[in-house]
Image (cartoon, grey):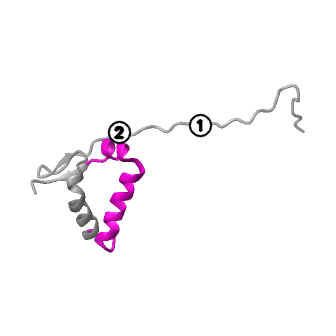
Amino acid sequence: MTILDTSIPYEKVLMVMDRKTIRKEIKLNSEFHYVGFDESLKEAWCKLQTKVCLFEKIEKARKKWDSMLTRDKDFFSKHFLFVANEE
């Protein structure tokens, strides 16, 4: 039988174990390149998301774009990269 040592005060503790971070840049086809956030890319992004069936209608894609910007525009503009071609 195990007995608790009551001389040690009980404290709730949250244990956080960090995960290994995998940082890997994916090489793109030479026809494409990464570009940073730019509000002018909204319509192209919405059309692409609708074309690949992520959204049923383009209006839903536009709402998603707007909600991401509303939630945290600073984060979105710093960390969201687009894959683009010459068009």
Q: Magenta residues: mostly which secondary structure?
A: helix
How far from the left and from the top, in percent, is residue 70? Answer: 39, 53
| 51 with respect to 76 (left or right) | left
Q: Give the range drawn in magenta.
A: 52-81
Give the mark count.
Answer: 2
Q: Which residue is drawn at 31% across and 70% down?
A: 59
Judge whether residue 66 is colored magenta.
Answer: yes
Q: Mark 2 and mark 1: span between their CA atoms?
A: 21 Å
| 59 with respect to 86 (left or right) | right
**Quadrant of the snapshot with the N terminus:** top right
**Quadrant of the snapshot with the C terminus:** bottom left
Depth order, front residue of 76/2: 76
- For label 1, the residue is 16
Where disc 1 sits, the SS reads loop
Depth order, front residue of 1/64: 64
- Is 21 located above or below residue 50 in the figure? above
Q: Which residue is drawn at 33% across and 58% down?
A: 65
Q: What residue type is labelled 2?
A: Arg
Q: Which quadrant of the view contains residue 41? A: bottom left
Where disc 2 sits, the SS reads loop
Mark linked to residue 68? none
How far from the left and from the top, in percent, is residue 21? Answer: 42, 38
Q: Which quadrant of the view contains residue 6? A: top right
Which is nearer the N-term, disc 2 or disc 1?
1
- For label 2, the residue is 23
Q: Which quadrant of the view contains residue 43? A: bottom left
Q: Which amino acid does label 1 sit on?
A: Val
Q: Can residue 78 be seen in this view?
A: yes
Depth order, front residue of 23/76: 76
Q: Give the residue furthest to the front.
A: 70
How far from the left and from the top, in percent, is residue 53? Answer: 31, 71
| 23 with respect to 33 (left or right) | right
